[in-house]
């Protein structure tokens, strides 16, 4: 376990709560397949590996169960991981939420507030030009997250916040599939321009096509990752 934790290269800010640190590490290890489906997650072992008490570990496992990444059985907690079916469910949920968000923003005549998405778009452009995949993925997620701020729908935003950490890891995997990041950036610009111009129908089509492409690249990346992890 300690080797896996050291190998992923993710620096954790010291200011974060211990439970959040453990949660983020475990989420990455599970989604990337480094902790494969069926792995028994023992609190005492995790506590020793992370050098924390059992409390933060227990909190992390509870959250991961809420996210559907682990499951409790009679003999303890086990990794559920992600299957292709899970990915399909996540992306169908994401499509439903994002389409609702842009419809809400159009219905409430919040189109002027699409300026909120311009910062993430600018970051994406710079990252694409520099080949900075990690920054691009973070800005990509921020762009899509802005939909919920613009829509002003609190409950919809809370659902997004529940799944956002999972999508953050998945988006990192998807972005790594792109040789050239500029086409992805341009597809985001297209969605943004349609919404700014009040073209909801065209924005809907562009968003659906974008998410389908993202889903397909993720399935390809995930299949390769899990295959490598099983070898």
Image: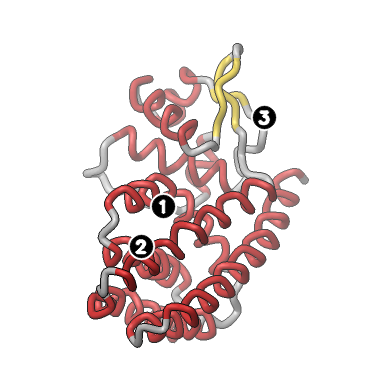
Rendered residue at 77%/46% (across/down):
231
Residue projecting furthest to the front: 107
Residue 78 location, quadrant: top right
Residue 60 location, quadrant: top left
Residue 193 location, quadrant: bottom left
The x and y percentages for residue 142 are 35, 65
Left/right of residue 122 with respect to residue 60 in the rendered view:
left
Residues at badges 1 and 2 in contact (C-beta under 8 Å)? yes
- The earlier-in-sequence mark between 2 and 3 is 3
Q: Nearer the viewer, residue 155 or 190?
A: 155
Comparing labels 2 and 3, the label whose residue is closer to the camera: 2
Mark 1 residue crowding within 10 angstroms, few (<14) / some (14–19) / many (20+): some
The x and y percentages for residue 44 are 47, 17
Q: Which residue position is annotated with label 1?
A: 164
Colouring mode (rainbow / by chain / secondary structure / one colour) = secondary structure
Q: Which residue position is annotated with label 2?
A: 145
Give the label on residue 38, or none: 3
Left/right of residue 116 with respect to residue 54 in the rendered view:
left
Mark 3 residue crowding within 10 angstroms, few (<14) / some (14–19) / many (20+): few
Q: Secondary structure at mark 3?
A: loop
Q: How far apart are the alpha carbons under marks 1 and 3?
A: 24 Å
Residue projecting furthest to the top: 74
Q: How far apart are the alpha carbons under marks 2 and 3?
A: 32 Å
Mark 2 residue crowding within 10 angstroms, few (<14) / some (14–19) / many (20+): some
Rendered residue at 37%/27% (across/down):
59
Rendered residue at 53%/56% (across/down):
170
Q: Is residue 27 above or below residue 51?
A: below
Q: Nearer the viewer, residue 140 or 112?
A: 112
Q: Nearer the viewer, residue 65 or 34?
A: 65
């Amino acid at each position: 376990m300690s080797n896996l934790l050291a190998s992923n290269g993710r620096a954790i800010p010291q200011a974060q709560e211990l439970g959040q640190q453990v949660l983020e590490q475990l989420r990455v290890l599970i989604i990337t397949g480094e902790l494969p489906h069926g792995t028994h997650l023992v609190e005492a072992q995790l506590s020793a590996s992370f050098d924390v008490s059992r409390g933060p570990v227990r909190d992390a496992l509870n959250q991961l169960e809420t996210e559907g990444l682990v499951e409790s059985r009679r003999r303890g907690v086990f990794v559920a991981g992600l299957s292709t079916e899970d990915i399909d469910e996540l992306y169908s949920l994401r499509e439903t939420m994002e389409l609702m968000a842009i419809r809400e923003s159009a219905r409430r005549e919040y189109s002027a507030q699409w300026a909120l998405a311009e910062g993430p778009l600018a970051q994406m452009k710079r990252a694409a030009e520099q080949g900075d995949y990690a920054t691009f993925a973070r800005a990509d997620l921020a762009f899509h997250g802005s939909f919920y701020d613009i829509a002003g729908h609190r409950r919809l935003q809370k659902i997004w916040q529940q799944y956002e950490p999972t999508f953050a890891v998945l988006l990192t995997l998807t972005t790594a599939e792109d040789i050239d990041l500029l086409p992805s950036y341009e597809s985001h610009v297209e969605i943004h321009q349609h919404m700014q111009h009040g073209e909801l129908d065209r924005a809907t089509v562009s968003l659906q096509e974008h998410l389908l492409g993202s889903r397909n690249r993720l399935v390809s990346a995930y299949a390769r990752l899990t295959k490598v992890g099983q070898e």
